Image (cartoon, rainbow, N blue to C red):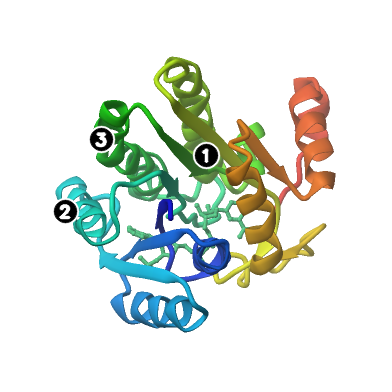
Amino acid sequence: MPVAIITGASSGIGAALAHELGRRKWKVGVIARRADLLDTLVAEVRAAGGEAAAATADVTDRAGLEAAVAALEATLGACDLLVANAGSGQPAPMHKIPVETILSTMRLNFDGAVYSAAAVLPGMLERKRGHVAVVSSVAANRGLPGHGAYSASKAAVSTLWEAMRVDLRGHGIACTTIHPGFVATPLTEKNKFKMPFLLTAEQAAVIVADGLEGRVAEITFPWQMRWVARLMRALPIWLWDRMAPKR
Ligand SMILES: NC(=O)c1ccc[n+]([C@@H]2O[C@H](COP(=O)([O-])OP(=O)(O)OC[C@H]3O[C@@H](n4cnc5c(N)ncnc54)[C@H](OP(=O)(O)O)[C@@H]3O)[C@@H](O)[C@H]2O)c1
């Protein structure tokens, strides 16, 4: 059975993906800070006939994260698939957001993903096989007003993964960038605005698992959001500045 390690798996997309991969006969290693939620998740995956193990870590703490990955690999076996999913964001316009919030968003969404990849890549390079995925966002396509720090952090991981995908071609390691649209999770439940094409975390997990098993370069979903993403990128600056959603 192949081994998947998912960060940010205590709730939302990460937890749903752990269930979905467990059902598809992957051994699943889950990482987050809330140990109680991870323990419940592991028990549920096992009760459904799967194999799972948990390790707590803050993804912004490189040494702690590496220890968690090493503990999971010791229990489940070498990591075949990493999903750097841990992430979050606090909406605020740029004239109100504290500088520290911008930097802490980068630490979680960018540094955390880099540390996660760095924890598994040496082993994958040695074995000449593996797969490293990151959960970015449709928000990576353009600087979204009110979400500048989040958009910037997601643009950074998407750009890094794009370069890494080509760098690692020929080393047997696939790279996947995941761009979700709106998914109903604790992250989005505080949103006051109407979220178009909203999916459940379970629906998202099926789409993500299908793409990961196909080792595709990019998973942007739902399909309507692929067109939204293309349109966002294509709009000239003057039109974007008029049309960009202000929240
Ligand atoms: N929901 C959406 O519509 C949507 C859209 C686009 C992209 N995304 C991305 O999808 C990913 C998952 O988000 P979600 O919507 O499923 O939200 P969520 O339910 O809030 O999940 C976030 C996960 O990240 C973990 N996490 C947060 N800070 C962490 C840290 N410092 N160290 C380790 N783990 C940490 C949380 O666990 P602990 O608190 O237990 O550590 C939790 O398991 C994020 O990267 C998010 O940006 C979501």
* Quadrant holding the N terminus: bottom left
Assess disc 3: are there few (<14), some (14-19) or many (≥20) residues with their C-alpha within 10 Å of its C-alpha: some
Are circles 2 and 1 on residues that touch, CB within 8 Å?
no
Q: Position of residue 108 (x, y in %)?
A: 36, 49
Ranked by sequence position, the earlier of labels 2 and 3 is 2
Q: Earlier in the sequence, mark 2 or mark 1?
A: 2
**Element under disc 1:** helix
Q: Position of residue 233 (x, y in %)?
A: 74, 26
The residue that mark 1 highlights is 154
Q: Residue furthest front?
A: 1
Mark 2 lies on a secondary structure that is: helix
State the separation of the CA atoms marked 2 and 1.
25 Å
Picture layout, residue 44 above or below residue 186: below
Q: Are marks 2 and 3 in contact (CB under 8 Å)?
A: no
Residue type at the position of mark 3: Gly
**Secondary structure state at the residue bearing disc 3:** helix
Say if disc 1 is inside 8 Å of ligand 1: yes
State the residue position of label 3: 123
Q: CA distance from mark 2 to mark 3?
A: 14 Å
In the picture of the structure, the residue carrying the numbered disc 2 is 67
Q: Is residue 221 above or below residue 72?
A: above
User: Percent from the top left, x then y, of residue 128?
Assistant: 35, 26
Quarter of the C terminus within the rendering = bottom right
Left or right position of 199 against 127:
right
| In front of the other: 243 or 216 | 216
Amino acid type for the residue under numbered disc 2: Ala
**Is residue 143 shown to the viewer in this render?**
yes
Mark 2 closeness class: few <14, some 14–19, many ≥20 residues within 10 Å: some
Q: Is residue 142 visible?
A: no
Closer to the eye: label 2 or 1: 2
